[in-house]
Image (spheres, rainbow, N blue to C red):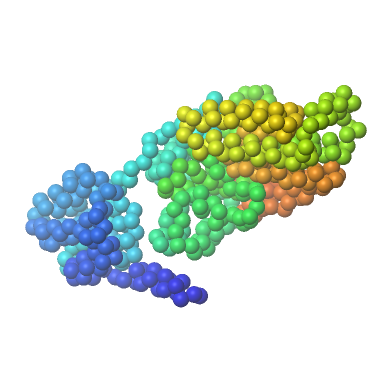
């Protein structure tokens, strides 16, 4: 252990073992030193002399509800004439006794008011936090035409309330696990206790507790610490901003992971098929939902292989192309000086630049600049004989198809994999492209998500609802996801 790690550990243990003193001045001096009172402008240290004794309150003025503080803490303490227990004097809904300084710090950091009384070797935490957050809005990245429109916010209590609304059951459990040290942040696991696989649940808890980094502030950072293969192109946790989507998974036996300050949640474990499914697939009628999946499946194949196949066929397998089309391609490339692979890569990179710029540019300008930029660049490149017109068409088709991805994380996987296949096809045509595809698929099959095969239930095959490639009529979906090994497999 490095010296700074040892020092950090000792500081944490010291807070846990530092008891609250009966001497009020000692407690006040300790807290004011720890929280830089006088420098930290929104940290309040307030002395209160009441008929029943001497009190001292600590809180952040920017994180507490000032009305609750005045009406339910200050006024009752000042007006009470009998020496009653503090839990009966203060009228806030939640007030608990605390014994050491570690609990004091946790309470202050989460927006509570800490109350000390002179002569008492315990403190009290009154929970009246009032953190500001956005109101519930429509989902921005997972839009649907049919189905609920609400999305998560950065407030954990608000997100939990949406879960409770969608799954009103005593079996819905919200369990808290702490992660990090400076400070320790709560991670909330949402699951249905009569369905969840305890082995998977314990695996997730173990991984969260094993994280020893100083601070993890949101779910997006936590995801990178939880993954078994952080360098992998394939995400093993589903990132979603839709409460209805998360609730659907929890009702199947999956586990949702939430943190404060995040407007999304993670679903674990996850297989590759979950990233290609859209919540709207189940809200639409059987034929319409499956038609949408078929369109998306075709789009995934196009975005992965159309550019690579063009490179392979035109360079190495021109005999596969009808003679008229081959002559048209040759005529369009007559004055283009670059090899086909560089031509394709140049346009693919240009398309990615336009896409990235469209995301970063302010909303009113993004779509306009994206469309104009693509038209101008494409037309200018063709007129300058840098690329051929057919390459512009192929790259546009490949890029547009990538936008059909149902999940933001898998969108990046498809885009990066596309470049891998293009480079592979440039070596030996379809032979090297097929080799790259086999390696790619073999790697996907080898991945696990919290002990669950990434390719389940296709391989290994398990009894499930058969909602893998195309879904069945909902009345006929009898089984839950078998790869989870839930406590109750039967839906009916």
Quadrant hosting residue 351: top right
Residue at (33%, 56%) from the top-left corner? 109
Q: How many marks?
A: 0
Residue at (33%, 43%) from the top-left corner? 132
Residue at (63%, 31%) from the top-left corner? 377
* Quarter containing the C terminus: top right
Residue 152 image point, x, y percent: 45, 39
Above-or-below relation of 223 to 285: below
Above-or-below relation of 304 to 53: above
Residue 254 image point, x, y percent: 57, 45
Above-or-below relation of 377 to 185: above
Residue 194 image point, x, y percent: 54, 47
Is 239 displayed left or right of 181 in the figure?
right
* Viewer can see residue 425: yes
Above-or-below relation of 291 to 458: above
Residue closer to the observer: 115 or 464: 115
* Viewer can see residue 123: no
Residue closer to the observer: 418 or 281: 418
Residue closer to the observer: 396 or 94: 396
Residue at (58%, 33%) from the top-left corner? 279
């Amino acid at each position: 252990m490095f010296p700074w790690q040892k020092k950090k550990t000792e500081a944490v243990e010291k807070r846990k073992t530092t008891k609250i003193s009966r001497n009020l001045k000692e407690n006040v001096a300790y807290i004011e030193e720890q929280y830089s009172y006088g420098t930290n402008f929104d940290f309040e240290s307030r002395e209160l002399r009441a008929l029943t004794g001497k009190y001292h309150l600590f809180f952040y003025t920017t994180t507490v509800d000032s009305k609750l503080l005045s009406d339910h803490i200050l006024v009752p303490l000042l007006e009470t004439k009998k020496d009653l227990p503090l839990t009966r004097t203060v009228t806030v809904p939640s007030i608990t006794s605390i014994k050491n300084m570690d609990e004091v710090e946790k309470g202050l950091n989460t927006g509570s008011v800490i109350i000390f009384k002179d002569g008492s070797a315990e403190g009290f935490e009154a929970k009246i936090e009032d953190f500001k957050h956005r109101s519930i809005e429509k989902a921005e990245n997972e839009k649907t035409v049919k189905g609920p429109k609400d999305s998560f916010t950065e407030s954990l209590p608000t997100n939990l309330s949406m879960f409770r609304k969608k799954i009103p059951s005593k079996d819905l459990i919200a369990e808290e696990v702490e992660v990090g040290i400076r400070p320790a942040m709560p991670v909330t696991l949402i699951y249905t206790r009569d369905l969840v696989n305890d082995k998977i649940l314990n695996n997730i808890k173990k991984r969260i507790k094993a994280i020893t980094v100083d601070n993890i502030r949101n779910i997006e950072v936590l995801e990178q610490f939880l993954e078994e293969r952080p360098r992998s192109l394939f995400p093993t946790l589903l990132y979603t901003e839709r409460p209805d989507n998360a609730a659907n998974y929890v009702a199947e036996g999956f586990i949702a992971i939430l943190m404060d300050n995040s407007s999304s949640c993670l679903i674990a474990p996850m297989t590759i098929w979950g990233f290609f499914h859209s919540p709207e697939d189940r809200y639409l009628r059987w034929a319409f939902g499956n038609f949408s999946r078929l369109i998306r499946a075709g789009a995934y194949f196009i975005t992965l292989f159309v550019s690579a196949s063009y490179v392979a066929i035109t360079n190495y397998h021109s005999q596969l192309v009808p003679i008229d089309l081959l002559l048209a391609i040759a005529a369009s490339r007559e004055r283009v000086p670059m090899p086909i692979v560089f031509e394709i890569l140049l346009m693919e990179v240009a398309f990615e630049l336009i896409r990235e710029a469209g995301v970063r540019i302010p909303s009113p300008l993004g779509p306009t600049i994206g469309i104009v930029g693509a038209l101008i660049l494409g037309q200018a490149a063709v007129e300058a004989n840098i690329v051929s017109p057919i390459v512009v068409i192929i790259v546009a088709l490949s890029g547009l198809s990538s936008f059909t991805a149902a999940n933001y994380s898998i969108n990046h996987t498809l885009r990066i994999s596309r470049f891998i296949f293009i480079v592979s096809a440039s070596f030996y045509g379809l032979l090297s492209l097929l080799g790259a595809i086999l390696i790619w698929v073999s790697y996907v099959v080898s991945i696990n998500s919290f002990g669950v095969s990434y390719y389940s239930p296709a391989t290994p095959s398990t009894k499930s609802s058969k909602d893998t490639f195309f879904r069945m009529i909902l009345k006929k979906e009898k089984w839950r996801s078998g790869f989870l090994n839930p406590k109750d497999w039967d839906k009916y």
